[in-house]
Amino acid sequence: MSVRELVVLGTASQVPTRHRNHNGYLLRWDGEGILFDPGEGTQRQMLRAGVAAHDLNRICVTHFHGDHSLGLAGVIQRINLDQVPHEVTAHYPRSGKRYFDRLRHATAYRETVELTEAPVHTDGVLAKTPAYTLEARLLSHPVESYGYRLTEPDGRRMLPARLAAHGIKGPDVGRIQREGRLGGVSLDDVSEARRGQRFAFVMDTRLCDGVHALAEGCDMLVIESTFLDEDERLAVEHGHLTAGQAAAAAREAGVRHLVLTHFSQRYTDPAEFERQARAAGFEGELTVAHDLVRVPVPKRR
């Protein structure tokens, strides 16, 4: 059975707290697992969340600040210790390759797994699989930072009533899907277009074109909201978003489920992030993330 869900491993910003680990997010997308921004402590959070090294197919790092990348060393060594049997691909800003190399080879260990490096240096498509297209967009932060977006290919939804009306059943359903026509009946006569699902991951950034491009039409948007709106000056100065800014971007993009995360340790009331997001006019599903929560990708409409 296919599973599409976000497993939140950590939700703190620069400073972890008693209740919030540094960043870490696993997207389960059918049979694949994509780990985003493994901060310090990610390996232990994976254990607590029931996530195994074998679940990882890609690692996507937005930028090389420690709260988004210090966990790479442990995760990479765990992949090798557990002898993951498939290739694992790592995406990260090419300008930070020296940091990736240091983390990958931070200590001695036996390399047993094919870890493919695929650095990002410009906007565009990073990978295409039958299940999704992965692309990156440049964000606005003091160090080079990229956001990531998955787009499922569009498909067709078969309509049982129309199939029955044309007497198409059993193996003939698969045949018309493969061939596009069966006798005088076309695929369009018995099906309708089904838009592929879309997911985006946006971390440390100010508002910029990349934020809006990544968020556009997403079923789920995971986005930083380091500050509350009253601290917008600090957000701009340090290259971050407020809860209201993140929610307004999601509203404008038509996002269905908004996941806010990456919270400054200065705030003690998570409910305030939800209040400010709603005040910004976002009316869709909303999750103020906490460590170890699982958030299903919304079902297709």
Image: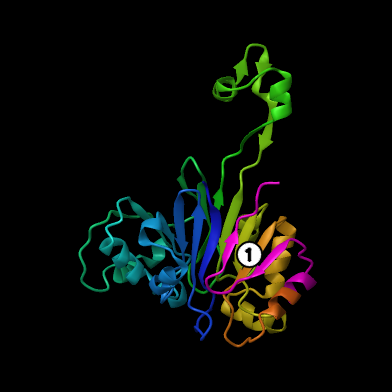
139 left or right of 37 in image: right
Q: Is residue 179 above or below residue 294?
A: above
| Residue 118 picture location, percent across and down | 38, 54
Q: Is residue 114 above or below residue 225?
A: above
Q: Is residue 49 above or below residue 199?
A: below
Q: Residue at x 65, y 59 (%)?
A: 212
Front residue of 44/153: it is 44
Front residue of 206/112: it is 112
* Total numbered badges shown on the rendered structure: 1
Q: Which residues are magenta?
A: 276-301
Front residue of 134/299: it is 299
Q: Residue at x 65, y 41 (%)?
A: 195
State the SS at label 1. loop
| Residue 236 picture location, percent across and down | 63, 77
46 left or right of 109 in image: right
Residue 283 lies in the magenta-colored region: yes
| Residue 180 picture location, percent across and down | 60, 21
The residue at the far front in this view is 170
Residue picked out by circle 1: 208
